Each structure stands twice: as C-alpha cells, then as structure tokens.
Amino acid sequence: MTAATTLEPRRAGAVAYHVGGAGEPVVLVHGLAGSAANWCEVVPGLVLRNRVIAVDLPGHAGSERLPKGATLDGFAAAVASVLEAEGVERALVAGHSFGGLVALRLAQRRPELVGGLLLASPAGISTARRAVEAVVLAATTVKPGKAAARLRHRLAPRPWYRRALFRPWFVADADALGERAVHGLLEAHGLHTGTRAAGRAMVAGDPRRELGEIGCPVLVLWGARDAQLPLDDAFEYARRLRARLRVVADCGHLVIVERPRAVLDALEAL
C-alpha cells in the first residue's frame, strides 16, 4: 500500500491487508476494482487515533481471487478472516461502494465482529438493475483503468489527465484531486486478478430485504453530486437501516478521496 506508507503489509491466508496506528480498530473496505490504497487520504488522519486495518478484497491488489461463482458471503468472510487473524473481537467497519455492500453482509453474517458501520456511497440498490449489470461486467472484463494506471507516474500532476479519468463519473472536481489520491486510486490496477467475480457478486441481488437484520449503529455518507449512484439510494438505505445520513456538498462518488475530512468526522461520530 504505497499510497499510505504508514501501514504495514500483512496476510491472512489468501487475503492481503495493511495495519497501522493504535486505539479502537477501524476496518476499511474498498470498492470494486479498488484496493486498500484507495483510502490513502483518510489513513493519515485515522492512524493518529485508531488502529487501522485496510483490506485488499479477494481478486484485488495482493489478495488471491475467490473461486468461480463467489458470492458476497465469500468477500465478507475474507474480511472476517483478517479480523480473526488480528485478534480483533469487534471493530468499526467502513465500506465504500462495493465495499459498503461487503460491510453490510459482514454485519449480517458476523454481527459480533461489527460495532458500527460507515457506508460511503454503498452499492447494491441501483447496481442491481440489469443495465448496470452489463456495464459492470464489461468494465471488469476490459479493465480500462489498467492502461491508464501505467501512465500515472508521469501524468498524475496534469489536470487534463485527472479530468479524463475521473470526471464526471467518479468525482465532482478532478482538478482538486492531489497526486497522492491519483496514485492511491490507480496503483493496484495492474495487480487485480478477480474483479469480474466481485462485479458479479455486486449485481447479483437486491440487499434491501435483509437490511432490517442490521442491529449495530450505521451512518450513511453520500456525495451530493454522485454520478454513479443516485441520492435516492442514500435516503432509502438510511430509512431501511434507521441510520443517520450525511450528504456531502460538491462531492461525487469517490467521497473517500474527495472529502476525507467528512469520512473522519463520520467515523468519529460512530
């Protein structure tokens, strides 16, 4: 996890993860085709007050992929295996996009491990539509980020490069992204081996019917200008989970790099 060098790389069997800091444990779960390094703007502030465990989901970055036909349960079990390897009995779990869906499944299947949930633009409602399924599966097959990532060392400082990659689908203001954020978002793209399985798990079903099973405190965080997932999803998640909702102005889907202060404040509120 070179974008956040304060964390130490470790493994729990097939799952790679990164650890640093001290205090109440917080687990960070990235989105589809992402990696632990996606949290590079959040980690520096978080390690000052918490023990941080940032996971590379199966098939992403340094983690081995799951078998064909893997479901959300397999991804949630991978996160649980990291907590068990670290001897963590209970933690706050923050999940972004697909990682939010994984965090929800972890709280359903292993509620004793989850003391609270921060869901940052979680997938699962709109992503269950058939049209979205086609886009997700195509993107995880073609892997457009892999080619762009090769150029990041030379082009990350260039505003046009950031705009071409991230606006408007990912962020509201690509010019405001720092170089660390660009590297954190792109550095693992050449290492992924199983993002298609994650994409299939993400679009496989509608999570809404099981949300009533979540008993821990939940806070939903959403970018007001998210071009991927509509704000209506945020309200529905908050209503069904009986959760607090914070909407971040002038922010797109990648709230974890666009507004890291909002993420830190939300975790502190939990």
Image (cartoon, grey):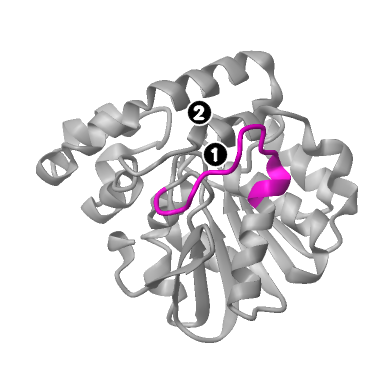
Q: In which quadrant is the C terminus drawn?
A: bottom right
Crowd band around label 2 with a 10 angstrom C-alpha radius: few (<14), some (14–19), many (20+): some
Magenta span has 59?
no
* Above or below, comparing residue 47 to residue 144 in the picture: below
Q: Quadrant of the rendered structure where residue 207 is?
A: top right
* Above or below, comparing residue 204 to residue 7 in the picture: above
Residue for point 37% across, 60% down: 41
**Visible residue check, residue 246:** no
Q: Quadrant of the rendered structure where residue 139 is?
A: top left
Label placed on residue 31? none
Residue 263 point in image, percent of width and height:
52, 60
Residue for point 54% across, 63% down: 13
Q: Which SS does the magenta portion mostly show?
A: loop
Label placed on residue 227? 2
Residue 110 point in image, percent of width and height:
79, 62
Element at badge 1? Answer: loop
Q: Quadrant of the rendered structure where residue 106 is?
A: bottom right
Label placed on residue 224? 1
Specify whether 15 is left or right of 111.
Answer: left
Q: Which residues are magenta?
A: 61-75
Specify whether 222 is left or right of 90.
Answer: left
Residue 100 point in image, percent of width and height:
63, 48
Element at badge 2? Answer: loop
Specify whether 55 is left or right of 70.
Answer: left
Residue type at tag 2: Ala
Residue for point 49% across, 37% down: 194
Judged by depth in the image, the label closer to the viewer, 2 or 1, is 2
